[in-house]
Amino acid sequence: MLNIKNLHVAVGGEEIIKGLDLEVGPGELHAVMGPNGSGKSTLGYALAGRDGYEVTEGSVQFDGANLLDLEVEERATAGLFLALQYPVEIPGVNNAYFLRAALNAQRKARGEEEVDSMGFLKTVREHLKALKMDEALLKRAVNEGFSGGEKKRNEIVQMAVLQPKLAILDETDSGLDIDALKLVAEGVNRLRDENRSFIVITHYQRLLEYLVPDRVHVLSDGRIAESGDRSLAHRLEREGYAFLDTAEA
Amino acid sequence: MSALIEKLLPEADVSDDGSFGALRRKAQKVLMQHGFPQRKTENWKYLPLALLEKRTFSTAGPVAGSVPAPPEFPFETGIVHMHNGLVDPQKCRLPRGVAISGMLPSDIDTSKLDDASPADAFAWLNLARFDQGWKLRVEGRVEQPLAVVTSCDDDFESAIHPRLKVELAEGSALTLLEVQHAEAAGLINGVMDLELAPKSSLVHVIDRSFGETALIQRTTARVSDAAEYRAFVLDGGGRLTRQDLVAELDAAGANASISGVAALGDRSLVDYHTAIEHLLGRTSSQENFRILADDQAVGVFNGRIHIVPGADDSHSEMNTGNLLLSENARINTKPELEIHAEDVTASHGATIGQLDDDARFYLRSRGLTDGQAIALLKYGFAAAVFDGMDAGALKEWMLERLEACL
């Protein structure tokens, strides 16, 4: 599904990702953990193609295509989804209109038929209900006036509607209370199948109790310093990242 | 600006035809004394009237000819069609409750015009070249909107000076839809007076866009006791557009709101000067005006709020937001508050910015192309101004027009 080799990414001329290798197979969920400033969000933005995140070296194959050759929207159409750590407010654009426009833009680019309004609304309502979100949010401007938790849950609604092949969740658990965390995790689990993959960037082991990762990676200073199964997350919870210094020394 | 005087006010042309002669003579005298605004005239400093000096206007005035059909609307509406500056009252389609008649000298109030400076020169010019004016009288609550449509022939290069007065009787209500589109290098120098009697309500919707046609328009709404004036403006640009929009709140309980969007591109030059005059206490106003300027367009917004001494317990909110969409576009925006009363609230805010890169990335990351993302952001920025319009066919039409302008 995703094969990253020797990835180097610079932001404002400063190298943040310094030779990262990562392979995510179909249906796998990988957790990426690591201390602040280790490059976790940079990885997400670089994969999504954000301006200012310059890939200076390395390659990224995604579902058979060279991801780095694609524009931001082409990556989305190819099936990549990034749930932002800080979802952006779009004043004046209502949620339902935006979501349908996004879905139809992707479908059109893939040569598929656009969805009709009624069918679309029915699907969105089901996702909203599952995430215990008020239907009235559909008529409100995208993320405007949403609480922190609502914004994060709205990202999951978008993911559920757009049905990506690979979803990168950038600290989607931060700022959520325990109930909201469970709802988000359930939303992710509902989408898990043998083909859809996830990269879950998080600071806390707590989310991984609900999501159960196939692999856990520790990012440090722009590289993967350690990989393991879910027990690695437990170890980090107990010991923190101090062992990285020992390992590097 | 003597060149402009010669072009727009040929000496021999100000005749005394009886009833309007005195008004015309006075207007001509003021104009000859003070001329047209210049760069140093504060309220006109961003509008290069030199553009008009370069043009040759036919001085023949309105020319009758074949009149095209007015535009169609996706809702039932009355129509007053002014083509090449002329209205044929026989062809007006008036909703029940609205009557049209020719304007009389007594319908024209010059008491608020400045005769000691060039500030109101174009309003005086309108009088000096007065040819045809119409009055609409509104009784009762008129359900159907009334569209006042302005159009010109494709080769129309005259200067015309239309004048319209709308009188709303006590307790009456009307939705007035002004639709103005013209392309040729003429000048429309219009004056509109709106008189709102106690407890009346006027929703004033303006949809305009021009090619080379210059528009200089002065609109004054006098809002009485417990009456309400709500303006919604959509300006799609033009080579030279100047709108002075004045709301005078002259009795307790009077309210005015102005919501406007100017979506400008190419070499558009659009200047909105609004003034809300709180002349008595317990009056209120709200204003929200947004300019989007692309290409080499220039947008000007000057929003004046004036609360006179003694107009206590008046409340006013003003917000102007602006988007610069190209390096060569310019926006000059100024909230201007002059408060002389106690116990009032008067808030204001002004922003000028560019499209938000974070928002653009966010939309693209969901599959929208950059072009779609930009269009959606512009639409979202502008459409919010019309949130206050009552839901229905007119609002939907206005939002479609906005989308077309962007």
Image (spheres, rainbow, N blue to C red):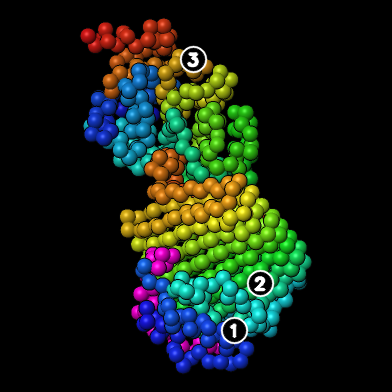
N-terminal label among 1 and 2: 1
Query: Quarter of the image containing the N terminus of chain B?
Result: bottom left
Subunit under mark 3:
A
Assign a secondary structure to mark 3.
helix
Mark 3 highlights which residue?
Answer: A206
Please give the name of the residue rendered at 44% of the width and 34% of the height, measured from the top-left corner: A81
Mark 2 residue type: Val
The answer to whether the residues at label 1 and label 2 have Cβ atoms under 8 Å apart is: no
Is residue A21 toward the left or the right of residue B203 in the image? left
The residue beneath circle 1 is B132
Labels 2 and 3 in the same subunit: no
Q: CA distance from mark 2 to mark 3?
A: 68 Å
- Where A104 sits versus B72, above or below? above
Above or below A199: residue A110: below
Q: Chain of mark 1?
A: B
Magenta stretch?
A: B41-69
Q: Are marks 1 and 3 on the same chain?
A: no
